[in-house]
Image: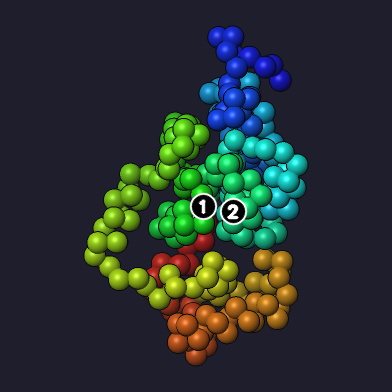
Amino acid sequence: MNDKNQTGTADTGPEGRLIRILLADDHAMVRDGLKQLLAKKYPSATFGEASTTQEAMNLLNEADWDVMLLDLTMPGRGGLEVLTQAKEIRPKTKILVLTMHPADHYAVRVLKSGACGYVTKECASEEIVAAIEKVLAGGKYVTAAFAEKMFSHLANEAKKPHELLSDREYQVLRLLAIGKSVKEIGAELCLSIKTISTHRSHIFRKLDFKSNSDAVRYGISEGLTKLD
């Protein structure tokens, strides 16, 4: 890849070197589309690609990255767990979550976990580029619609019960709410049945559930069943 763009100036990140962008998404078409989009803005950028959370962690361990676009739903460990570990390994890397999940499902959690921004895949390509520019400049990025909703929520609503759950418990709750069994959840999250059962017990205690049917009803009423 060329070191200079068409104007003869290098695309440099915060550390004064060529920008390095890590794309973590399990769909090759999404990664290809993002690479084409961002190569137009940053012609000299270096790209890394990961299709699983383990591949993402390996690339983070191997090199510094200026920005990482992270999907929350990939094979392996959950995206929230990867986000937390990524911030420990590469605290200077700007992490922008790019996902199909509506912002009101995960945005607050990922921002609290250290992400610099949250963009849904239905956003226009121009917005994705704008988000990357903002986080590279040291800012935070959420859509205007979500920012308005978040301020309204903070001003007018008490914290909902599921917002008191840990990130992993919240993830398990959402899967229980769509009717998945403990065994199915364990397979999806690459965790043992015993571990999922423990999370389930904690959820039931904190939310005063008696059965999985309570989780399903709660998930539907709170809009937690729209996974993708």
Residue 8, which numbered label? none
- The residue shown at (67%, 66%) is 189
Q: Above or below — where is 192 with respect to 1?
A: below
Q: Secondary structure at mark 2?
A: helix
88 to 127, vertically: above or below: below
Kindly identify the amino acid type of the residue bearing the numbered disc 1: Gly
Q: Nearer the viewer, mark 2 or mark 1?
A: 1
Estimate the x, y position of residue 71 in percent, counting from the top left.
58, 49
Q: Residue at x 75, y 42 (%)?
A: 62
Task: State the residue position of label 2.
Answer: 83
Give x and y (percent) for residue 185: 65, 72
The residue drawn where x is 55% and y is 30% is 14
Residue 19, quarter of picture: top right
Q: 8 above or below 172?
A: above
Depth check, front residue: 228 or 138: 138
Residue at mark 1: 114
Q: Residue 11 is drawn in which quadrant?
A: top right
Task: Say few, some or many: other residues with alpha carbon within 10 Å of mark 1 (under 14 / 14 to 19 / 20 or more).
Answer: some
Q: Is residue 52 left or right of residue 125?
A: right
